[in-house]
Amino acid sequence: MNDSKVYSSLAQENQSLCRQLAEHSFLVKLRTGNFSRDVANFLVSEQLGYNTYFLMALTLMRRQFLEYPEFLCGFLDPHLSTELGADLESVGLSQNGKTHIAMIYSLAQTLEMPINKYDQWGEAAQIFFDQALIGLIGGKSSSKALGAAYADEVFANVWFPEYETAFLSFSARKKLSIDLEFFNSHANEIEPAHVRHADYLIDFCLTKEFKYVEFLDGYREFYLHLVNKFDGLEAEIDAILSTRTKVEA
């Protein structure tokens, strides 16, 4: 298959899988914002866990691409820097804007989320972190790692807007003033970074002659792990709401 057919075929698969993901019952329920503060805390915890493990996965990813300084210096390291929670100015460096983890902590603090809830993201998320982030993006197959990282960029364009809508509805319904910069910045990028990052990853795979079949495997496996995570999150949130209903009764 030549490169033009690869791009066309992958674009069609992206469109199909993104449409299926957007119709997942977890996201459909979520977008109403009709959930409790306990559920909001759970979702923020899951996002904090995601970014923490994503940072670990990108760090592990370095070992597979030591022969490609242009990838490490031009893509992976800048990507890592946006995830770190460090205050660069404290060591005499410049920083433009907050890092992702700093944004998530700001969301948690304005939500008045108890500190002991910060790492309570549940079993489904932990399985996803271990298998999709550490196992694929941080795994030993460079081609599968590229495919999984590509999938992360593509499917983030589906679920980030849903999370933003959910938390906007939740905060309006509860009359809360919470910092939604993290979800807003990811859902409403003027030049969507997720799209550009995804394009870079598939271009890099093809121009450097990585194994495209394995790239596809990483992409598809990541998608399946993401669907399984949403299945699990939905069940765990239903359990949280059920417990709360019983207590209130």
Image (cartoon, rainbow, N blue to C red):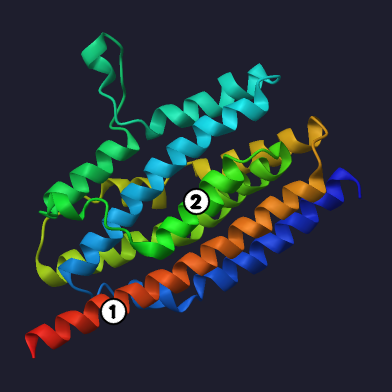
What residue sits right under mark 2 in the picture? 130
- Of the residues shown, which amino acid type is indicated by label 2? Asp
Please tell me in which quadrant of the rendered image residue 68 appears: top right
Indicate left or right for 165 with 54 as reference. left
Instruction: Check disc 2: other Cα within 10 Å, few if <14, some if 14-19, many if 20+.
Output: some
The quadrant of the image that shows the C terminus is bottom left
Q: Is residue 188 visible?
A: no
Q: Tell me residue 176's x, y (percent).
A: 10, 61
Judge the density around disc 1: few (<14), some (14-19), many (≥20) Cα neighbours within 10 Å: few
Residue under the point 18% across and 72% down? 36
The picture places residue 81, in percent across and down from the top left corner, at 41, 27
Left or right: 208 as drawn, with respect to 224: right
- Using the image as rendered, state which of residue 71 and residue 166 is in the foreground: 71
Instruction: Give percent across and percent down for residue 206.
Output: 79, 37
Mark 1 — residue? 239
Q: Does 75 appear above or below 222?
A: above
Q: Is 76 placed left or right of 177 in the picture?
A: right
Which kind of residue does numbered mark 1 sit on? Ala
Q: Mark 1: which secondary structure?
A: helix
